[in-house]
Image: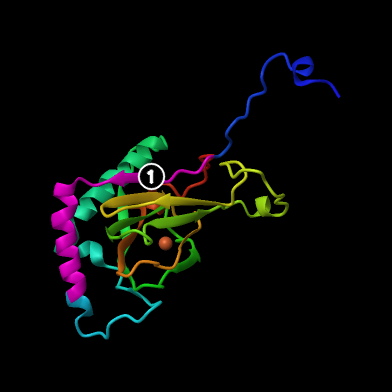
């Protein structure tokens, strides 16, 4: 077999095809501290009549939190993040709409199975209360065919892993494609893990973007 130097005129290149983004931002303390106090107060009021969560339980609120005054500065940050994503993706100015926004409260032991958020362009999560042993979220390889042959590897890299663990903290805001499967490990801390999830879609998808790309009239 020829040695590498005998075959190639230059070092082979590895091109990254179809990379998937996860947009990670950290809110300023002067923004997230008062915001989180407002959110926690509102969630506490919502849950006042309910029994406390048991070990392993996760509670989800209704899906209209983005309409509540306590969430106003979060909604503003979500729009700023989503507009940054559109710019990053070179998508021309498009009006976006938050189509759903809800809270997740996980007692110790509670988590979320792998899922996607259909019928939206972007999804995201804002972290209100997380702590050590409850401070990660998992993203899974969306290419189902890549799992057909998975030989053992000597080291996990971006090119051979089927899962990427992203570390988050209180005040972290993530935005990612709504089709990207994700999951949350069981909360291994002794305190609740509290986050706010949301979905985003183009405001007038059918009117402005639903037509065939080839422009047939
Ligand atoms: Fe989700």
Quarter location, residue 102: bottom left
Can residue 153 be seen?
yes
Q: Nearer the viewer, residue 197 or 208?
A: 197
Q: Which residue is mark 1?
A: 23
Q: Nearer the viewer, residue 176 or 147?
A: 147
Picture coordinates of residue 109 (x, y %)? 41, 73
Q: Is mark 1 within 8 Å of ligand 1?
A: no
Q: Which residues are magenta?
A: 19-44
Quarter location, residue 59: bottom left
Say which residue appears at 67% left-offset and 52% top-offset.
Answer: 145
Q: Dot 1: what SS?
A: strand
Specify whether residue 111 is painted magenta: no
Q: Residue furthest right?
A: 1
Quadrant containing the N terminus is top right
Magenta-highlighted stretch: main secondary structure? Answer: helix
Picture coordinates of residue 116 (x, y %)? 48, 61
Establish if 124 lies above or below 112.
above
Picture coordinates of residue 141 (x, y %)? 57, 52
Picture coordinates of residue 71 (x, y %)? 19, 60
| 34 with respect to 77 (left or right) | left
């Amino acid at each position: 077999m020829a040695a590498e130097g005998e075959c190639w005129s230059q070092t082979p290149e590895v091109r990254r095809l179809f990379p998937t983004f996860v947009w990670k931002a950290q809110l300023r303390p002067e923004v997230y501290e008062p915001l989180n106090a407002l959110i926690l107060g509102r969630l506490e009021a919502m849950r006042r009549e309910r029994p406390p969560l048991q070990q392993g339980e996760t509670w989800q609120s209704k899906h209209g939190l983005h309409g509540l005054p306590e969430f106003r500065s979060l909604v503003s940050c979500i729009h700023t993040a989503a507009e940054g994503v559109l710019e990053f993706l070179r998508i021309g100015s498009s009006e976006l709409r938050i189509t759903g926004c809800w809270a997740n409260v996980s007692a110790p032991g509670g988590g979320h199975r792998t899922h996607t958020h259909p019928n939206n362009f972007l999804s995201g999560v804002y972290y209100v209360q997380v702590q050590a042993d409850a401070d990660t979220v998992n993203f899974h390889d969306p290419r189902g065919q890549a799992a057909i042959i998975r030989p053992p590897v000597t080291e996990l890299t971006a090119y051979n892993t089927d899962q990427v663990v992203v570390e988050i903290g209180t005040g972290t805001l993530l935005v990612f494609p709504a089709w990207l499967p994700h999951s949350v490990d069981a909360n291994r801390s002794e305190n609740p893990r509290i986050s706010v999830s949301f979905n985003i879609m183009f405001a007038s998808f059918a009117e402005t973007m639903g037509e065939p790309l080839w422009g047939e009239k």
